[in-house]
Amino acid sequence: MTERLSGKAAVVTGGGRGIGEGVAVALARAGAVVCVCARTEAEVRRVAGEIRAGGGRAWALPCDVTDPESVRGMVEAASERLRRIDILVNNAGAASSAPLAKITLEEWNRIMAVNATGTFLCTQAALPGMVERGWGRVVNVASVAARTGARYVAAYTAAKHAVLGFTRSVAAEVAASGVTVNAVCPGYVDTEMTVESIDRIVEKTGMSRDEATTALLQTTPQKRLIEVAEVAYSVVSLCDADAKGVNGQALVLDGGKLLA
Ligand code: NDP
């Protein structure tokens, strides 16, 4: 898919590490100029710097996707630097786990804000320009948690279901405009977020790290974590010009656990 996105301008939220970093790098390799956004300035600067060092084009734009002012400022700055936004990857997210009785309202609101409200705010700000120009790609990084339920992840699951419902409805709204809106739904990916999930298993069960990792991998059909590059590949594919018929879809990357 070399240079298939040449001339396109992309914004990746949560681009400072993990999946977002991989997506930003992959979009740049495909020829797009990329704005890398997250709250931690040092991380977005590092990722943008590495893209530039590799011959790509990138800007670092610190942004908190839960804050409407911050999102407005980021979209304005990105539109100014890139002259437009053709591709928006709503990847910023956070996970947590607790039995229902122990989920505080504060924690519920935090998880909804970053995963669901952030996706809403960034999409609402970036979409009008895409619709006006008749071309655009929005890819929301949801999760398998958008397609199924599990113990102790009610807040995260509700937030990711919200992301998928939002994806489908906005896809319907812009279907005739040349813009597509899709979601990718990975299982456990090899990032810090999964390291934290393993830490929580260790903390709650008293298992060793190795035992907790084995227990987590046993729940996956391929007995492995999904690589960041696999998610990035799917996101870039959905951004391709030839993906224009794919709209409102949820692409599951979990090695074959969820089969419907
Ligand atoms: P990481 O924790 O490694 O990275 C999360 C990124 O989101 C960071 O760059 C972080 O930067 C950014 N972020 C968090 N809060 C905000 C905020 N309020 N505003 C802007 N940026 C924010 O997570 P992953 O890379 O693993 O996850 C990325 C996405 O993929 C998430 O949406 C997650 O739910 C989803 N996902 C992850 C899976 C996994 O197993 N890892 C599986 C399925 C889906 P900073 O803190 O500096 O703002």
Image: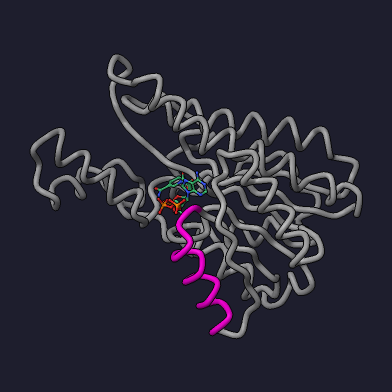
Residue at 22 percent of width and 39 percent of height: 200
Question: Which is more toward the observer, 46 or 166?
Answer: 46
**Which quadrant of the figure has residue 59?**
bottom right
| Spot occupied by residue 126 in the image (x, y as percentages of width and height) | 75, 48
Answer left or right for 228 relative to 83.
left
Residue at 71 percent of width and 60 percent of height: 78
| Spot occupied by residue 9 in the image (x, y as percentages of width and height) | 74, 65
**Which quadrant of the figure has residue 133?**
bottom right
Question: Which is more toward the observer, 164 or 9?
Answer: 9
Residue at 45 percent of width and 64 percent of height: 43
| Spot occupied by residue 183 in the image (x, y as percentages of width and height) | 62, 43
| Spot occupied by residue 169 in the image (x, y as percentages of width and height) | 73, 30
From the viewer's perspective, is residue 75 above or below residue 248? below
Residue 45 within the segment the image draws in magenta: yes
Check the picture and name the quadrant holding the N terminus.
Answer: bottom right
Residue at 38 percent of width and 27 percent of height: 107
Check the picture and name the quadrant holding the C terminus.
Answer: top right
From the viewer's perspective, is residue 64 above or below residue 114? below
The chief SS type of the magenta part is: helix
- The magenta segment is 39-53
Residue sitting farthest toward the top: 101
